[in-house]
Image (cartoon, rainbow, N blue to C red):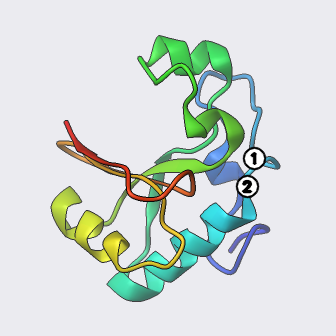
């Protein structure tokens, strides 16, 4: 499928504001985490939000120093799995940084380890 890895394309990660930035700025560690998570859950992963330019990050209420702006974070869904199930699977990944559980998606990043939140 993709040019970043076996299952992920740079097009999945571009900023949603229309600026088309970011697809080529995704951290290889994030892609490795996503591939490992895909193997763990044995299902495709949908990237809801990958790279965000500063303008779009502010518009969506992202953290001022969001890892999305450096290509180190993704908000994801896995069909048929709740965010809690996806987050639990992500906990087992070596190199996982932050994990956030939201109502309809899960945030994962390769920033500093041990950051967890629920919103």
- The residue lying toward the viewer, choosing from 64 and 9, is 64
Residue drawn at (53%, 52%) of the image? 112
Quickly name the residue at label 1. 23
- The residue lying toward the viewer, choosing from 10 and 51, is 51
Which quadrant is the N terminus positioned in?
bottom right
Report crowding for label 2: few under 14, some 14 to 19, many 20 or more residues within 10 A (C-alpha): some
Quickly name the residue at label 2. 10
Of pointers 1 and 2, the one earlier in the residue sequence: 2
Element carrying mark 2: helix
Q: Is residue 50 above or below residue 90?
A: above
Q: Is residue 82 visible?
A: no
- The residue lying toward the viewer, choosing from 82 and 84, is 84
Q: Viewed as shown, does residue 60 lie left or right of 68?
A: left
Q: Viewed as shown, does residue 32 lie left or right of 89?
A: right
Q: Quadrant of residue 64?
A: top right
Residue 77: % across, % down: 34, 58
């Amino acid at each position: 499928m993709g040019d970043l890895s076996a299952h992920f394309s740079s097009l999945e990660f571009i900023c949603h504001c229309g600026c088309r930035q970011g697809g080529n700025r995704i951290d290889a560690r994030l892609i490795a985490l996503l591939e490992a998570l895909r193997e763990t859950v044995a299902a495709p992963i949908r990237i809801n939000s990958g790279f965000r330019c500063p303008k779009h990050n502010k518009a969506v209420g992202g953290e001022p120093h969001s890892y999305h702006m450096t290509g180190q974070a993704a908000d994801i869904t896995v069909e048929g799995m709740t965010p809690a199930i996806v987050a639990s699977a992500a906990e087992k990944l070596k190199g996982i940084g932050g994990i956030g559980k939201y109502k309809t998606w899960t945030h994962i990043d390769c920033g500093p380890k041990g950051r967890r939140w629920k919103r």
